[in-house]
Amino acid sequence: MNTILFGIAFVGGTVVVTLAFYFLMRLIMGGDPTGKDRELASAIVLRIASLHALILALVFAQEMIEYQRLKFESVTEANAIADIYYDADRYGANEKGPIQKALFEYVQIVINDEWRMLGSTGQLSQEAWNRWDSVYQNVLDLTPSNARQQSIREHMLIDIHDIADARDKRQNSGTDSVSGIFWFAAISGVVFMALGYYPYPPDPRNLLLLSVLGAFTGIILYFIYAFSNPYNPPATLKPTAFERLHEEMMTQPGPS
């Protein structure tokens, strides 16, 4: 409900800004009783609107790409964890215990604590890093006795480094917010477009069209804001890949 109310307030705010600056400009200019300003104003508004739409489209596309990239990296990390978890079982019954236990705890920390921390502080959990290091140290300490174990150990070392890379990317996804310069340009575009419509009288149809312009711009800005931080509402990306892996681990005999 809070998310819906915030979205309504966000969109309503752009409508209010659009109408407020439209009326302000009419108050300053006194309207356009002769109709001579309309042609120039329309040409200027068209150019501003084109540049404004281009800026919004580029930033929106960038945020969507980053959002989808985080989903992909989360799946990649969860897959690497699963590979190590089951490779430890293949390596040997005596060696798998500490590795699988640390991985199980790592996944729990990511789901219960780290995802929330990334949204509030933008930082990764040190406890999760400690579990990662425990897995790394245990894999390094393995002493293969045959070619099979040697191959499994090498694959686990590759996967453990993939997990570290994915963690760094998850942190970057949480701290890369939209620049304040963009918001300045976005709001300026709304204001200048509203100013350019002053030659048109404030009859109900014109006011409705101006409100539609402000509302649609507000919706796009709201989506950009929502996707700029995937760890917080309104477009929170849940750790679905880790939750599925955790459920799978729970069904396996061992550390659970």
Image (spheres, rainbow, N blue to C red):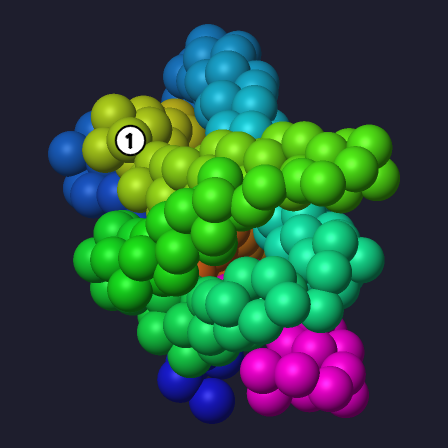
Q: Is mark 1 on a helix, strand or loop?
A: loop
Closer-to-camera residue (137/40): 137
Q: Is residue 143 visible?
A: yes
Return the residue nearer the eye: 254 or 103.
Answer: 254
Taking 234 as reference, is 31 left or right? left
On the rendered structure, is 228 left or right of 204? left
Q: Residue at x 25, y 57 (%)?
A: 126
Q: What residue type is labelled 1?
A: Ser
Q: Where is residue 79 in the image (x, y as percent from the top left)?
A: 72, 52
Which residue lies most toward the front here?
A: 145
Residue 28 horizontal/vertical position (percent): 15, 34
Image quadrant where residue 58 sits:
top right
Is 205 or 139 nearer to us in this picture? 139
What residue is drawn where x is 70% and y is 78%? 249
Determine crowd level at label 1: few under 14, some 14-19, many 20+ residues with C-alpha closer than 10 A: few
Q: Is 239 included in the stretch rendered in magenta?
A: yes
Residue furthest to the right: 148
Q: In this view, does 153 lie above or below 223?
A: above
Residue 185 image point, x, y percent? 32, 26
Q: Which residue is drawn at 39% across and 56% down?
A: 134
Q: Please identify the quadrant where the C terminus is shown.
A: bottom right
Question: Number of callouts in the render?
Answer: 1
Residue 201 seen in render: no
Magenta stretch in the rendered image:
236-256
Residue 41 picture location, percent across and down:
44, 18
- In the picture, measured across the screen, residue 130 lies left or right of residue 70, that is left
Residue that numbered label 1 is attached to: 179
Q: Is residue 111 above or below residue 178?
A: below
Magenta stretch encompasses residue 208: no
**Farthest left residue?**
28
In this rendering, position of residue 87 left or right of residue 164: right
Residue at 56 percent across and 29 percent down: it is: 62
